[in-house]
Amino acid sequence: MKKKIMLGIIALSGLSMMTSCNHSSVSNDVLVIGMECNYQPFNWTTSKNTEDTLPIDKTNEFADGYDIAIAKYLSQDLKKEVVIKRLEWGSLIPSLNNDEINMILAGMTDTHERRESIDFTDPYLTSDLAFLIKTSDVDESLGTKEKPMSYDELLNLFDGKSLVCQSNVVGDDFIETYFVHNKQNKAIRHSPAQATYPLAANDVLGGISFAMPAELPVVEAMTNLNKNELRVLYCDYKGFLSSEDQNGLSVSIGVKKGNSELKEELNASLAKLSAEERSSMMAKAATRSSESAL
């Protein structure tokens, strides 16, 4: 999931419930959400006004993505107004602790280091690791959902080839940690990271790179770029990812330390949303991302 930096502007949602955010502190009566609006497929900016988007304050642009879908769901379920602030990644936690926002909904992973300064809800998305590959490059019997590839099999398959991912996400780190610096001395290369998943997927489609690691809903959505030529390669990632890196495949909502009231409300609302519904929401967001990015 996401871990570094992007852009910043203040944005206002329009769920049929609207509010301003001119004050310097916020209460739990309003969901004041910090995100980047520049990290596909979790959140990004678009010029299209659709049922999946929210308007960005004082611009003619709109925000879309999985985080926006979750924000809409929480607003409707909790019957609370929503304000979205678009902030740089590095400003999210300081803004939360300074009471400029009361939630971080930005594809953020719950880590021990971050828990020292903020609290987290239960995950609002937990996924599996998979790879996007060209159908013609790998036998259809390999890397299936029923028989995922082991780490050794992946290393043998990727030997002499290059892997690519979107920049500033854990999948890009996984390439370096588990494949480039593998202990079997396989010659696996790391292609320059792309700005978005769709652009990385296009590298795979064009034969520039052999495979792209990402969360399963993202990989499934990227196959929509060309269903005849791209497919999912499943892997037994629990056999080689560390527990910390497995945790990196989950994202949670950040709240200010001690704000147990909001944390409990959010957890109760998220508990009503099934894993299937969450995966569907992510797949739809990733599909819209692929359609808008190329």
Image (tube, rainbow, N blue to C red):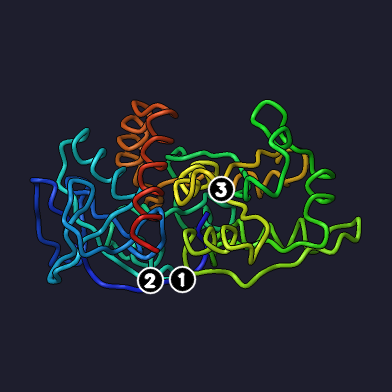
Disc 3/disc 2 C-alpha distance (Å): 36 Å
Secondary element at image label 3: loop
Residue 51 horizontal/vertical position (percent): 18, 46
- Label 2 neighbour load within 10 Å: few <14, some 14-19, many 20+: some
Report the number of numbered marks.
3
In the image: residue 292, left or right of residue 32: right
Disc 2/disc 1 C-alpha distance (Å): 6 Å
Give the vertical position of 84 relative to 246 (above or below): below
Task: Look at mark 3 in the image and give the residue it sits on.
Answer: 229
Answer yes or no: do the residues labelled 2 and 1 have beta carbons within 8 Å?
yes
Residue 117 horizontal/vertical position (percent): 48, 58
1 or 22: nearer the viewer: 1
Residue 290 horizontal/vertical position (percent): 40, 55
Task: Look at mark 1 in the image and give the residue it sits on.
Answer: 5
Task: Look at mark 2 in the image and give the residue it sits on.
Answer: 88
In the image: residue 242, left or right of residue 284: right
Residue at point 52%, 52% (across, down): 115
Mark 3 vs mark 1: which is more N-terminal?
1
